Each structure stands twice: as C-alpha cells, then as structure tokens.
Amino acid sequence: RRSSRNRDRPAELAGYVHEGLRRLFKGNEAEVRSMLDAPKSEAVPELIDRCAGVMRQQDLNPEMFLGRFFSAAMMGKYCETVGKSSKGGAGALATRCVAHWQKEFA
C-alpha cells in the first residue's frame, strides 16, 4: 500500500520543464486556469505546482501530460514562437515542446 502523504505534495519538476511550462503559459493563463479549474487569482507559479501535482498523481511524464491536457492549438502556437513546426497532433507537439525545453533550458 502506498502512503497518501507523498500524493499531497507536488512533484519536483526538472528545471527545464518548469521553465518550459512558464513560457508555454505566458499569454495562455486563462486557458490553463480553466483547464485546471484554478481560481482567476492564481499566478503562474501556482499553476505550475498544480501541473506537477497532476503529473505525480497520474504518473505522467511531461510529454504525456502536455499531450493529454493541453490543446494542439496552444502548443502549436508556442512551437511557432520558438521557431519549430506547428504541424502535428497534440502528442507530436508535446514531444516537440519538451525536446525544445531540454535543449534550451537543461
């Protein structure tokens, strides 16, 4: 049986994932808040903590999390802003985003 204490605290995110989410959320805060059922007053650092908690609770890596919970439109727009292709479905775009974060921020 797993301890419930570990599920209460957010997962530690790798630095590149934290920075990547911060940049992905810029300009998309309302959509992210809506997706996470977060209050309008919640700032980006708290949204990132919520995302970390979801990844931990559902045992998802960053690519799986992005592909499952974020729209292809949002990720495609982000990919365009960093000079990457915006083509593909949510899974392909999620992989592209995380690969970019690993190169740029790791």
Image: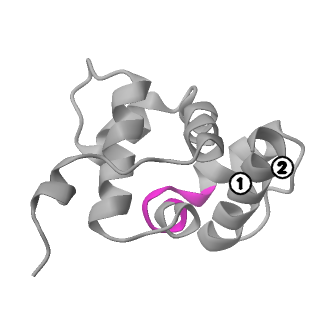
SS assignment at label 1: helix
Image quarter in which the N terminus is found: bottom left
**Does the magenta run of residues contain 98?**
no
The kind of secondary structure the magenta stretch mainly shows is helix
Q: Estimate the x, y position of residue 100 in percent, counting from the top left.
A: 79, 51
What range is drawn magenta here?
66-72
Total count of labels: 2
Say the numbered circle drawn on residue 103: 2
State which tag comes first along the sequence, 1 or 2: 1
Residue depicted at 71% across the width and 44% down the height: 77
Task: Calculate the distance from the C-alpha at mark 1 to the C-alpha at mark 2.
Answer: 10 Å
Q: Estimate the x, y position of residue 14 in percent, counting from the top left.
A: 57, 48
Asked whether, in this view, residue 70 is left or right of residue 43, the answer is: right
| Residue 27 higher or lower than 41, as above or below | below
The residue where tag 1 is placed is 97
User: Looking at numbered disc 2 in the image, what kind of residue is underneath it?
Assistant: Lys
Image quarter in which the C terminus is found: top right
Q: Is residue 35 visible?
A: no
Q: Estimate the x, y position of residue 85 in percent, counting from the top left.
A: 86, 57
